[in-house]
Each structure stands twice: as C-alpha cells, then as structure tokens.
Amino acid sequence: MADDYPSLLRSEQMSLVQLFVPTEVAHDTVAELGELGNMQFKDLNPNVNPFQRSFVGEIRRIDEMARRVRFFSAQLAAEKDVVPIRPLYDSAPLITVGPRAAQTIDELDVTLTEHESRLVKMNESYQTLSTRTRELIEAKHVLRETAVFFDRAQGQQTDIRTSFDESSAPLLQHDDRENQFSSVGNVQFDLEFVTGTLDRARIPTFERVLWRVLRGNLYMNHTDIVEPFVDPATGSETRKNVFIIFAHGDALLAKIRKVAESMGATLYPIDANADKRAEALREVSVRLEDIETVLYNTGSNRRSEIVKIGESLRSWQDVVKKEKLIYETLNLFNYDVRRKTLIAEGWVPTRDITTIQVALRSATEESGTSVPPILHELRTSKTPPTYHRTNKFTEGFQTIMDSYGIAAYQEINPGLFAVVTFPFLFAIMFGDIGHGFIILFAALYMILAERKLAKQDLGEIVGQFFFGRYIILLMGAFSIYTGLMYNDIFSKSLHLWHSGWNFPGAEGVGSKIVGTIGSHRYPFGLDPGWHGADNNLVFVNSYKMKMSIVLGVIHMTFALCLQVPNHIKFKRPVDIYANFIPQIIFLMSIFGYLVITILYKWSVDWSQTDVKPPSLLVMLISMFLSPGTVEEPLYRGQGPIQVVLLLLAAVCEMKKIHDQGYVGLNHEGPRDSSDEALEGEEEGNGRAIAEAADEEHEEHDFGEVVIHQIIHTIEFCLGCISHTASYLRLWALSLAHAQLSEVLWSMTIEGFLNPAGVIGWIALIIISALWFVLTIFILCIMEGLSAFLHALRLHWVEANSKHFEGGGHAFTPLSFANAEFKE
Amino acid sequence: MEALFFNVDTGFLEGTVRGYKAGILTQSHYANLTQCETLEDFRTQLSATDYGNFLANEPLPISTSTITEKATQLLVDQFNYLRTNAVEPLSKFLDYITYAYMIDNVVLLITGTLHERDTHELLDRCHPLGVFDTMPALCVATNVEELYQSVLVETPLAPYFRDCLSASDLDDLNIEIIRNTVYKAYLEDFYNYCSSLGSPTSDVMQRILSFEADRRTVNITINSFNTELSKEQRAKLFPAIGRLFPEGNNQLAKADEIDQVRQVCENVSEYRSFFSESSGMNGSAGDESGTAAQLEDRFFHTEVHLNKLAFLQQFQYGIFYSYMKLKEQEIRNITWIAECIAQDARDRMQDFIPIF
C-alpha cells in the first residue's frame, strides 16, 4: 500500500519490526540506526529496574565520562578570557564503531581521566598559590593602612597627651600611669593591638560582638581595601576591610584573636615600630613578587591545558552523548534464551525498511563480523505511531497542527492544507502591501542566511521566528496579495489603473462631492476611488464582513469534506451516510444558503431595482423565527425554499441521531465500527484522548450511544452557528489593522508631508523614522502576532473540529541528530 | 473565615509545599532503594525520584555523608525559598522552625568548645538553617552569663536562655540541662505562638507540639535514671505543655524505673502502645537500652504519622512544619539505607521509617 512518493496527506505507513542482533554487532547496529534516525525502539523489559538492566555498567562508565566532560566545560566557562572551543564540524571525529570501538572508548576514558586529574592538580596548586598571594596582598594592605593610621596618630599625639593627663587619668589602670610617668617623652603606643582583615559584610557584626565581649574596652578602626579579591575557583569577588583593634591586657587580646578567627578574619601580626613595619612591608613585597611569578607560570600552564581541552571538548561531548544514547537503547533490548543475540522491537516507516536493511548490513561490515542482524516484520494490531515526513518548508506548518494534537495513524493530515490556508487566513486579517513586503523581506533574509543563522543560538524568541521563517514567507506573500485586493499600502491606496469613479471638480472647501460611476470597472481589487470617500468605511465593512462569512463557510465545508477520505480509508461507510452527509446538508442548507444569498445580493445592481436591498442578517434570523414569511424578499419563492431548507436541516439531524443509534444497537460483533466512529468523533471535538497501546473496545450500551449522539448533534448545530460567527474575526481584525495603520499615518507623518525649509525636512526625516519604527513594532510584529493567533484558532477550533480525529502518538525515533543540540 | 483570605498571602506557598510533599519518597521508592547493591546504584535510583541529578557532579566513590549533605542542602534551599516568599505571620512561623536548629547549633558549639574542638570544624557541622551571623563568637564564652551577654542577647533565642543563667559552669551535665531548659522554653513559646494564630493552625500544631513535648519529657525521664540529676531538677526540665502535663509530668518527675514511665504513658491512649510489646518481649528491666531504642523508633513512627495528618487540613501553617519534619525523616532514612549499603548490613536495611 506504500505510495511511491512520501506524501504529507497521510502519516507514513509504519511497520513493527523485530531485529535479531548478535551481541557483538549490537552496539554498531544501534549506532548506525541512530545516525539514520528512523526507528523507534520499544521497551521490551518495562518491568526491570533501571539498574538491573544489561548495560548498566557501560552506562555508568559513560556517566562518569560525562561528568568529567561537564567538569571541563564548567572550567572552560568559568575562565575569564574566553577559551576557543573548536566546533564539532571542525574536529576530527572519534570513531566509536567497528572493531576498534572498545579501544577508542577505553582510550577516551583514560584521556579524560588524565586530563581531569591534571586539571584538578593544577587547580589545587593554583588555588594554594593564589591563596598565599592573597594573604600576602592582605598583609601588604594591613601594613600600609595601619601605617597611615599610625602616622596620623603620631601627628595628633600632643593633643592626645594633654587630654589624657587631665580627664582620663583616674580611669587608667595603675601600670598605665606608671608607664606614663616613666616614659612621658617618647612612648607612643603602649596599648597593644590586633590587626587583620575581614570580609566587609561581617565588620558590623564583628564590631558589635567585640564590644559586647570586651564590655566596650577597645578601640577599633577599620578601612576598606579598594580592590576586590577574586576567588580563582569560583570567580566570585569578596571585598575586605583592614581592621586594627587596640585593647589592653592579654586576656582581652586573646579573646579578640579568638573572636576574630572564628568570624573568619585573618590576623597579621605587625610591629608597633615604624622601621620594623617598613621592613616587613619590603619583605612582603619581595615575597609577593616571587610568588606572583610562580602564580603566573602555573596560570599559564593551566591555561594551555584548558586550551588543549577546548580543542577536543566538543567531540568528547558528542561521543559521550551518543554512547549514552546507544547504551540506553540497548537496555531496551531483550536477550534471547541463549544470551547470544539481542532482540529488539520497534516501529519503522515501511518505506524505510530497505534503507534500514542496508544500514544493518553496513554495520555488520564495519564491525568486521560475518553475522548480520536479521530484520523481520511483525503483524500487529497495535496502533502504530504517527509520522509525518516533513522537510524544512513543511516542518513549521506541521508543527502548528501537531501542537494541537497528534493526528491519528494514517488519517488525513490537516498540516498539509495549512500550508495554504494558514497564510491565507492570516493575510485576510493582515492585508497591506507595505506590511506584507516588510515581513516577506524579513523572512527572505532569514531564509537566505539560513545556514549561518541555524548554527547560532538565537535565543528563545528570535529562534521561534527563525523556526517559522517559511510560514512568515508565505504570510508575507499572501499579505501582499490581499493588500492588493484591499488596495492598501501603509493605509494609502495605489492607483494602478484608472478609477471607475469620476469626481467632478471641487467647488469649495467643505462641500460634498458625489462621485459618479464611469463606464469601466476597476480590474483588480478595491477601486482607489473609495479611498477617502465618506462612505468608505461602510462599504469596506460590509464587503469584508460578507467576505469573511463566505470564506469561513468555504473553509468549514472543506474541513468537513476531509472526513470522507478518512471514512473511506478506515472502511466506515456507515459514517459517510450517517455522519458526513447529514452534517454537510445541515451546513449547506443554512450557511451554504447564506453564502449563496450573499453572492446573489452582490450580483444585483440595487440602484436600478425598485425594491430596497434586504438585510441578510434579518433574513437569516426570521428564517428560524418565522419560517415561511419573508418581509423583504430577495428573490421570488424565497419563503417556501427557506422552509424546505429548514426542514431539510432538521431532518438531517434527526436522521443522524437515528442512524447512529441504530447502528450502535445493531453492531455487536467484534469489529465494531460505530465504536470507532464514536471514538473518532469524540476526539474530533478537540479532546485528544491518549489511547492505550492495545485497543480494547469498550461496550457502549444503547442509551449511552443515543445520549452521546444527541449531545454530539446539538454540539454540531450550535458549533456551526458559533463557528460561522467566529469567522467574523477575519473582518474585525482586518478592519482593525487598516484603521490602526491609518491612525498611525495621520498621527505622525501626515502633518509633516510638505516640509518648508531645513527644519521641515529634518522634522520629516525624524518623524518618518519614528513612523517606520512604529510600523514595524506595532503593525508588523504586534498586529502580526495577533493575526497569527487568530488564524491559529480558526484552524484549531473551527476547522479541526470538523474532521480531526487526533489521539495518535508521535513517532520518536532514536536519532543522534536530535540529541546533538539538546543540552 | 480563614479560608477566605488565606490564599491571598499563603496560597502560593501552601501549593508549593504540597508540591514538595508530593516528591517525598514512597514505599515503592524505598523498595527500589533497598535493592541497590552499591552506592552508585543508589544514586541511579535516586535520580529517578524528585532528588533528580543532585549527585550527578560528585566524583566517585560517593560517601554517605555527601549524600546526606546534598540532600540536606536541597531541603535547605527549599526552605529558604519558602522563607523568602513568606509574609507575616507565616514568616514568623517559619522563623520559629529555625530556632530549633539554632538551639542545636548553639549547644553543639558550646559542647565542642568545651572539648576543645576546632571551631571551623564545628561550624561546618552546624545545621545550615540554624546559622546566625554572630554564632562563631560563641566559642569565646566560658560560662553561661558570658554566653548570654556577648552573643545570645541579640538573637531570638535570648528569652529562652534567660531561665538558665543561674547555671554558672559549663560542663557536660550543665550543657545538657541548658539544652533541655532552652528547648522547653522554645517549645512552650512556639506552642503559645501557634495558639495565638488561631484555628486551624493551632489545632494541628498543638497536636504535633504536644507530642514533641511528651516525647522530650519521657526521654528526659528515661535518660536521667541513675545519673546525678536530681528529681527536682528533672521536674524543671519538663515542658509545661503536652498531654502528659500536669499529672503525668509530676509522676514522671518521681519515677525511678521504666515501669513507672510505662504506667504514666498508659494513661494516654495513643501512647499506650509504645510500651506494650516491648515489655512483653523482654519481660525484664535489664534490657533497658533495647527498650529505649525501640521506644525511640515508635516515637519516630508516631511523629511521622502526626505530621502526615497535618496535610489533611488546608489553610493552616502546620504543613510547613510537618513538611520539614517529614523531609528530615526522609533524609535520615536515605542516610540509613546508604549506610547499610556502604557497610553491607543488608539485614538491618529495613529498619527505616517509611513515610508514604
């Protein structure tokens, strides 16, 4: 049944295949299949714990390797100067298949371990060295800052002295006084002190604790160290302060030291003597120089190691990721009885079986054994996964539909039709030649720069636009077309041909001019004569409103008709006459009729007839409320025709309920087609139900079926009305878009159009730039997104509810290509 | 009425905590964990739970202490998330939860300093939830007075310590007395605070805290047999809340052996089972340590049970407390299983306390 060419109309035909893989080629086979990326493996031992599976040892080893690689990339990322990482396509590939595969992995493991231990060692020595450097720098700062403090204190000494003698003498301790007397002349700092550095954030706490512990018997001074200290391992900055605390007595000093140490301060003993301090400073500077040289050497060694790692990091990451995937897949396999071969089961697209067989053979050759894996197809009653083969053009459209729900296996795929209908519905709401061109060019740029952009990480928002570039391209092109139809370019109109309207010359400002219709008609789109006319809005409104109803009914009818190929494909003839035909007749007899009257009303020249043009809205309402009577006739015999149509609609619904109920009652065989139909309909209304893999037909009893049918029928009838009304959003958004662009034009650029002098020109340029920016952001991006959203809704709700069954599960093949960029 | 406005301030956090609670390991998780042969298996198995890849970046071989540490870190992160998002009065309630850890840390530091252990090593062993920034200065203090004046006076624990300022020297017995006095004060304060929050928080929390108080009372009694602690001193350590208070407490204060404790406990129907089997099995008071161990186990079981009950009621803060307690129990369980795997003591592996 497989077609010659893959098509997007239905999902791929799938087969369940079984592979018998000899243990020795298993790894290479999976690698080959992963490169191919079109087989979805089934878990054959779902009841086994993850750590009791066959290849846990290998996975664990790979995990360990992965941890090392992660460690490397973290180290590389933490490096301040950016380390060049050679991209994957540049690096020599590591061969992990074939007879030497095991060896390669072993070697890689060893390399990684070596690199890790070397890097860890280097980090350690770097760490110790930089800690020592930091200590020395801190010591330097302590010396310098305290020197400043001492100097200042010395300058003020005489003042201090006098004040001491007078007021604080009684408070001083006995030995202090002795000291004073014995060395009045030259003693400077008989108080003892503690110096050190401490994290700036902890200074207040430290001060408070000390004050409390020493009961206020201390004098503390601290200054900031200006430059921050950077931790080489984490790269985080700490800012520190130098402090000096004066206190008296050994017990107190010991306490201060203890508190300081437990608060995380580093103490640096310094001397009260200025000369000794200077000497210490010199010594520290010398040592600092030495250690900085060593640090520099270590740093550059480490750097070169890291650069070396950077060269092959990507290929390691690649290998590790692939190997992990391979072994995880192998864990899904089952051993046969003699444990010589592995058994795998999985879904493949039927047309790819030959490709897979070729791949299996090449895997055998590559691994150098003579026993090829055996593939054979299984017959199954399980529902295969849904697989739409897309290319980069259709991918975006298919994604739009897949995010609503995965189609059932082999049902008509709405994604195919979305390629045209989606941009078209969008363009109806976004009709403007100028805006259309802007988004067309944006999309063209993205498509032309595709190769370059695909490699970059664009970020979440831009990345999404890039993913939808072909959708945007078509949306742009269609917008240009609808823009031509509406004759709108940045809210102005184009005069491509002569207008069909003739306006006599103006007689005075403010006077009304009435145009007269000429002999020829404008050949394409809206006549530019309407632009600026008083009744422009009235005309355009009525035109766009009716157009959206017409297009909406056409779209819904088309979607409804898509049921038929599904019913034929799944051999449910009963659904065609019990479901599809009543529905289509119902839709046609009410809304199809409305469309016809719209078209008829357009075709009549009401200025020539003697009757007033009837309101179609009133006609439709009175068709339900007072069938048979028509107040403003559109054509002759309208009353009876409307009655007949109404009866037809009612009969169709009755028949639908009856037929479905009847079929539901009669069928009690194992092949219960109406049940399938019911399930299908249930899901058609947007509730995607994940079916269990084994299809078990539940038995519905008659009452249930009838009630379900009644609900479904009512839902369909109400749905038809509300959905038709829902298409009016086409009109509303298109109107809003046109009005918004007109407002933007008149609010900004219009007043500046006739520039006088240099200032006028400058103002024009500035305001044009403003206008252009606002056009892009408000009209193209914001309005575009809203139109996109509404087009999305029209497809998901209004169209999909007519035919879409859904409830499929997506085909997720083992593929290295998908895994590569996931991180 | 509390249901009307509760969600304005606390709805999000309650939801968060209930989400966290859904991640607590279940019986089947434990069944899988106990089948592990090595700690690597253990890690693989844990990565399938809510713990996720919390050990993925640890180099092999993993030690049980790393597992505990990382698991605790996860819990602490969760708690800090809740704490930062909380407003009054929930934030205060959450603060009360941290006080218990602070008391533990303070006692740990004092004991450590008394035995002249390295301060930094002690600081590393402190529970991260009970850390306060003047904490390191605790190791300077040599007596309670100083301890209080220099450090504790500015912490929220200050009022709890006021009662035990009389104890002058710091020695092992006194520290133990301080710990219990402070904890008693804390429990009573927390109990009163919960009562002030009104129903249903008070209903749930009073039940849990009463049990906690009774557990302490019984433990103090049993542990003080044949020690220097006089009966009057013992009586002072009993929290003045709980279901055993006041008659039970009075009797316990006079108790001399475990049988008397049992008699007191039998007055409360829920506690009756604590002693029932153990006495039947051993029959003699000689196996007191065994009884105590078993008693401890039952206490944990009851605690888990009570905390699980807290989740049955909505619009109350008890679940925050209960979640912390359950998670702590879970970490204890994980550590226990990991320890059993590491030491190859498979026969004792089942002795953890399952939560769900």
Image: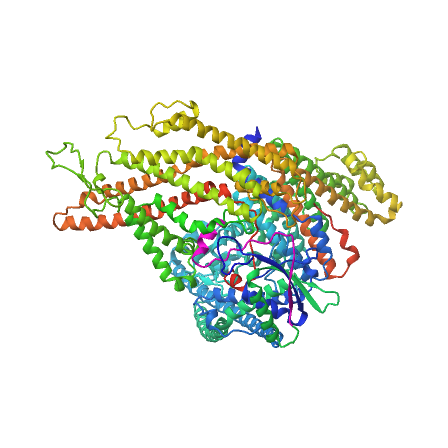
Residue A321 visible within the image: no
Which quadrant of the structure image shows residue B2? top right
Report the residue that reaches farthest toward the left. Answer: A507
Q: Measured along the vertical axis of the image, is residue A617 above or below residue A524?
A: above
Q: Tell me if I can see residue B50 in this picture.
A: yes
Relative height, residue B44 to residue B260 (above, below): below
Side of A793 relative to B66 (left or right): left
Please give the range of residues in magenta. Answer: A372-401
Q: Residue at coordinates 39% horizontally, 64% vertically from top-left?
A: A452
Residue A239 pos. (x, y %): 46, 59
* Number of dots carrying numbers: 0
Relative placement, left or right, of A327 versus A196 is right
Please tell me whether residue A576 belongs to the stretch shown in magenta: no
Tell me, what colour scheme is on the image? Answer: rainbow
The location of residue A701, given as percent across then percent down, is: 66, 35
Comparing A695 with B112, the one in front is: A695
Q: Quadrant of the N terminus of chain B?
A: top right
Give the camera-side residue of B118 and A819.
A819
Q: Is residue A641 above or below residue A793?
A: above
